[in-house]
Image: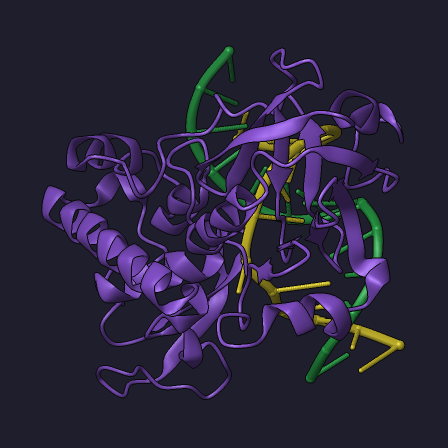
Chain colours: A purple, B yellow, C green
Amino acid sequence: MPELPEVENARQVVEKAVGRRIVEVDDTDTFVCRPHPPGEIAAVLTGGRLTAAHRRGKSMWCETETASGAEGPTLGIHLGMGGRIYVTSPTSAEVSGEGYSGGDPFLLAGTSDKPQWTRFRLRFADGGELSLFDKRRLGRVRLEPEIDALGPDAELITREEFRTRVGRGTAPVKARLLDQAVLAGIGNLLADEVLWQAKISPRRPAGELSLGELDRLKDALAAALVSAIAQGGVHTGEVISSRKRDATCPRCGAPMERATVGGRTTWWCSQEQG
DNA sequence: AACAATGTTCAGTC
DNA sequence: GGACTGAACATTGT
């Protein structure tokens, strides 16, 4: 689930944990916490607290403060392919992720998921906790994450930046949209959605797009982000439900086509995105 | 059993 | 060196 809208949702959940004293850290998953050996993250965070939660594209990071009030290390969190964030307190609970907008987060946090899928956890002095739940284990937690390599956030990129950054190169435009160094936040589903909305073939070489097409893509991106954030995730996109065999275009009824583009399974309208 | 999965990274090629 | 491609990563669900 995690593309920009889901990660923004998760960031807002992480904010619920800001200011609370950390009394225990579980960083024993060596794959999720690589390259840190078990105990390294715990050693620097225990006794301190999170002071802010930020996001750029799909990457989150927290500023921290040590037990003595000095500036602490930055804690980076990436949800990978399917991570979720849980934050609980003695009286409430918050969960991020697809399908969790309507349910009772306290029950979900307590009972519905297998505890062994919790890959990282902060326990707070008030009895609550923040945990990263990720059955696939492709999520990541690390100190001092590198965020400078990311392009501008997909929600903040300007029309000018979008034209010059996306509209170049010989790679398919979808590959360009997925490149987090070009712009940060677009994943496989969102890429298919905006290309479909803008009626542009995912396979078109990015550098061959006209300014008009690039602007259409940018507008489709802005609209898709607003919609996905409002509706709870990129899976609510109009064309996403048509990513299955024998599906037809929700707009014109023509068959949807499927192929690997930019290394990922891609669906597009055979008629309108030819 | 084989394959795909809303992501990133690294090795290899042009 | 830069641009680009495909495999690998760990695990689950179909």
On the rendered structure, is A16 left or right of A56?
right
Quadrant hosting residue A224 = bottom left
Q: Position of residue A145 (x, y in %)?
A: 61, 25
Q: Where A4 falls versus A246 (above or below)?
A: above
On the rendered structure, is B11 left or right of A209?
right
Q: Where A252 falls versus A267 (above or below)?
A: below
What residue is shown at x 54% (from left), y 73% (from top)? A99
What residue is shown at x 22% (from left), y 84% (from top)? A252
Q: Position of residue A214 (x, y in %)?
A: 19, 46
Q: Where A65 falls versus A244 (above or below)?
A: above
Number of numbered markers: 0
Quadrant hosting residue A141 = top right
On the rendered structure, is A86 left or right of A16?
right
Q: From this viewpoint, which residue is outermost toward the left?
A: A212
What residue is shown at x 41% (from left), y 80% (from top)? A242
Could you tell me which quadrant the N terminus of chain A lies in? bottom right
For the residue pair A202 and A118, the one nearer the viewer reads as A118
Q: Position of residue A98 (x, y in %)?
A: 53, 67
Q: Position of residue A36 (x, y in %)?
A: 81, 26
Could you tell me which quadrant the C terminus of chain A lies in? bottom left
What residue is shown at x 62% (from left), y 38% (from top)? A77
For the residue pair A146 and A17, the one nearer the viewer reads as A17
Q: Where A161 falls versus A97 (above or below)?
A: above
